[in-house]
Amino acid sequence: MDTIGVLTSGGDAPGMNAAIRAVAKVASARNVRVLGIERGYDGLIDGRFRQLTRAVSWGMAPIGALQSEGNKGGTMLGTARSSRFLAPEGRQEASNRLQSLGVRGLIVIGGNGSVAGAHHMAIESPIPIVAIPASIDNDIGCTSDAIGVDTALNTIVEACDRISDTAQSLKRAFVVEVMGRQSGYLAMSAAVASAADAVLIPEHQSTEEEIVDSIAELIHRNLATERAKRLVLIIKAEGVSIPTDRLVSEIEARLLDTNIDVRGVVLGHIVRGGAPSFHDRMLAGRLGLVAVEAIMNGITDHMTAWRTTVSGGRLTSDPMVELFPITDVLNETEALLDGSSEITKRRIRRMEDIQGVLAL
Ligand code: F6P
């Protein structure tokens, strides 16, 4: 009987569990055993395996716990950012573990660092490896969506709505910081959906002075002179270098001779938790199906991609899902993060055009 392995790696994302469940369901329907690997690449090196399927009278079935675990946030397998896997020796140990168990292929669910790790192992090891993009940051090339992004955005939008309630009651300005160490995608998308006035993203590389001057002027214009306006909402990505508390105090210093209040809120890890939305579960199911099919067809060093706008992908059984060589994914990821990708430029233009959001 064939066996495949599955692991989650890097930052967790809502919907990772739904992807693990989908892999186990699709594989067992094809009479393939699934081994779950705990704590990402570290667990692979250490041989921390767990059965996700069981033998039944008609063949294979997913273990019972997957049915409800798949609806939860986080990752039931645990995850890690592995420094040992960065070294060829660590990857060799990981590959030896899989080969000694006769594993036919590995599915890696994670963000851009995890996808890069999958690429390195795929070129060094005889075991086929396919990645499924999962990261709330949506900073992975060649796919329009990664698992976890939609849930994270719903959480952010709900938080911004709540903050807007209190802000407009007291006629205040708020700076809301959201996750995104290298990418402003969450901040930009939430800005459109929450009708924010401005968004601060790392892709723009504005100086601290430019940011403070522009935001202080925007707040003053809207709250001191524009009587109909009752709140100013600024969404800031974590990756913008100025810390939120310092930004707020510097803006306040500029507005000293007005009676405008400015507050800062850092949403932090709240954005990464919670039960996955319908969209993330659907994405997990469809990407999981294509990943298992790819492994069974011997495809390696590829990533599943959802509704791509990039050419060069391989068509699959799902018209919305293509498979991209991971080298293409990594090149596009680099361009997304340094702002040179057409996709990043289009996202910024769209945000400015739809809501007139000031992007800095
Ligand atoms: O998963 C990516 C991410 O959400 C980044 O946006 C953020 O900077 C990082 O994870 C935080 O990671 P940690 O949980 O290790 O602090």
Image (spheres, rainbow, N blue to C red):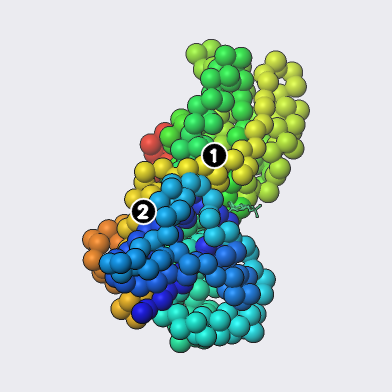
Q: Amino acid at mark 1?
A: Val
Residue drawn at (36%, 53%), measured in percent from left and top? 283
Q: Kindly indicate whether the residue at mark 1 contacts the one at mark 2 (C-beta within 8 angstroms).
A: no
Q: Going by the image, does 214 lie left or right of 107?
A: right
Is residue 150 or residue 19 the one in the foreground?
19
Residue 220: which quarter of the image?
Answer: top right
User: Alpha-carbon neighbours of circle 1 within 10 Å: few (<14), some, or many (≥20)?
Assistant: many
**Residue 247 image offset from top left, x and y in percent:** 70, 37
Q: Residue most toward the front?
A: 57
- Residue at 57 percent across and 50 percent down: it is 180
Depicted 18 relative to depicted 356: above or below: below
Under mark 2, the amino acid is Leu
| Mark sitting on residue 136 | none
Please, what secondary structure does the residue beneath circle 1 have? strand
**Which of 60 and 335 lies nearest the eye of the viewer?**
60
Q: How far apart in space, not on screen, are marks 2 and 1 (Cα)?
A: 28 Å
Q: Determine crowd level at label 2: few under 14, some 14-19, many 20+ residues with C-alpha closer than 10 A.
A: many
> Where is mark 2, residue-wise?
283
Which residue is located at x 67 percent, y 25 percent? 262
Give the secondary structure at mark 2.
helix
